[in-house]
Amino acid sequence: MSGRINLPPYPRGWFAVDVSAALAPGEVKPCRYFGRDLVLFRTTAGEATLFDAHCPHLGAHLGHGGTVEGENLVCPFHGWSFGRDGACTGMPYGKRIPATATARAWSVREQSGVILAWHDLEGGDPDWEMPLFDDEELTEPMAMRRTIHGHPQEVMENSADFGHFRFIHQTHLVRAVGETRNEGPVLEFQIESDPEALVPELRLDQSVMEGLSICHGPGLSAATLVPKGSGLKALQRLYVTPIDEERIELRGLVSVGKLDDPAAAETFASTLTEAVFAQWDNDIPIWEHKVYREKPALNEVDSRIPEFRRWYSQFYTSPTG
Ligand code: FES
Ligand SMILES: [Fe+2]
């Protein structure tokens, strides 16, 4: 990555490739992630499916002119069709389907409003799952999307970087409290705003904010952060997916707790969502221009960063490798 970020570009794990609402039944989209050309489509029955883009026959890009027929994707060049597992299911001419006529189908999960693909450079199968965020008390998420220069680990590291909130996000300094949960692909900090660190002119209000900062796998940083004792709820999820060795895609989703008064709920949801989107946008110039310091000079507030980095390093190795 232009020498700025000396980290392997493609970690192993689940990454968002779209939000559910953006892919209708029958829709076919070309896309590019993990340095590869891909095609994402939704079958008539509603199954989100991801293939390598180029047809195993003579190499047409299935995302440019390919069409969904039932549970199959039909190539625009010679009309061969491929089922969800990638196997060729039909040819409009000729009698014998060649044994090699199989599109590479990726492992996909669709859950909590997001379509996730499993990436493993060595082709290994998923060996853990992503969490569900299906809280019925939360509204449907509102989503933003950005393509930027950067690396997934650098975006995720923000979850453990409690010092930056005051400067980038104009909120309270945040600190980790209680036990860290560090279990396999999950790293979770309990966090609250630090009352001793409040700067009066930057204070949002008098209340202490508390919540969770959750890293789940190499490409999801989620957080809840709400005023203590307020009964309000909010969940923000930032998915980061490598496009190639230079660029990443960010998808931010915000959902808030439902309130009895629908008008108040809508105002709360849109105000909070806009604020969170603006906060992510504030991070972007840093991510786009920073270098990765392998041995950073840290103080005691930064103490979770080494822990985060040790945890994240698991996504650069494969159990088969
Ligand atoms: S290139 Fe796809 S059917 Fe020929
Ligand atoms: Fe941030």
Image (tube, rainbow, N blue to C red):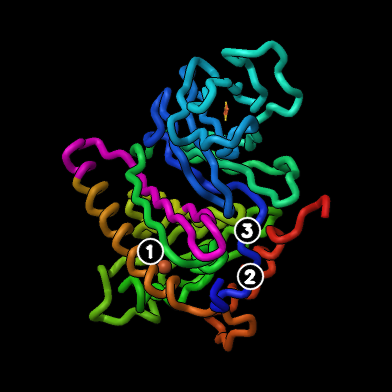
Relative depth, front residue between 65 and 69 = 65
The residue most toward the front is 94
| Vertical relation: 191 (above or below) 29 | below
Residue 179's tag is none
Residue 147 painted magenta: no
Within 10 Å of disc 3 (Cα), the crowding (few <14, some 14-19, many 20+) is many
What distance separates the C-alpha of mark 2 from that of mark 1? Answer: 34 Å
The residue most toward the top is 95
Relative depth, front residue between 191 and 12 = 12
Residue under the image location 37 percent in, 52 percent down: 145
Q: Earlier in the sequence, mark 3 or mark 1?
A: 3
State the SS at label 2.
loop
Q: Earlier in the sequence, mark 2 or mark 1?
A: 2
Within 10 Å of disc 1 (Cα), the crowding (few <14, some 14-19, many 20+) is many
Q: Which quarter of the figure has residue 307?
A: bottom right
Label 2 C-beta lies within 8 Å of the nearest ligand 2 atom: no
- Tell me residue 32's x, y (percent): 51, 48
Q: Which residue is disc 3 drawn over?
A: 10
- Tell me residue 301's x, y (percent): 52, 80
State the SS at label 3.
loop
The residue under label 2 is which amino acid type? Leu
Residue under the image location 55 percent in, 86 percent down: 299
- What is the magenta range? 239-266
- Tell me residue 315's x, y (percent): 68, 58
Q: Are marks 2 and 1 in contact (CB under 8 Å)?
A: no
What distance separates the C-alpha of mark 3 from that of mark 1? Answer: 34 Å
Q: Which residue is disc 2 drawn over?
A: 7
Relative depth, front residue between 69 and 21 = 69
The residue most toward the left is 263
Q: Which residue is disc 1 drawn over?
A: 209
Residue under the image location 39 percent in, 81 percent down: 197
State the SS at label 1.
strand
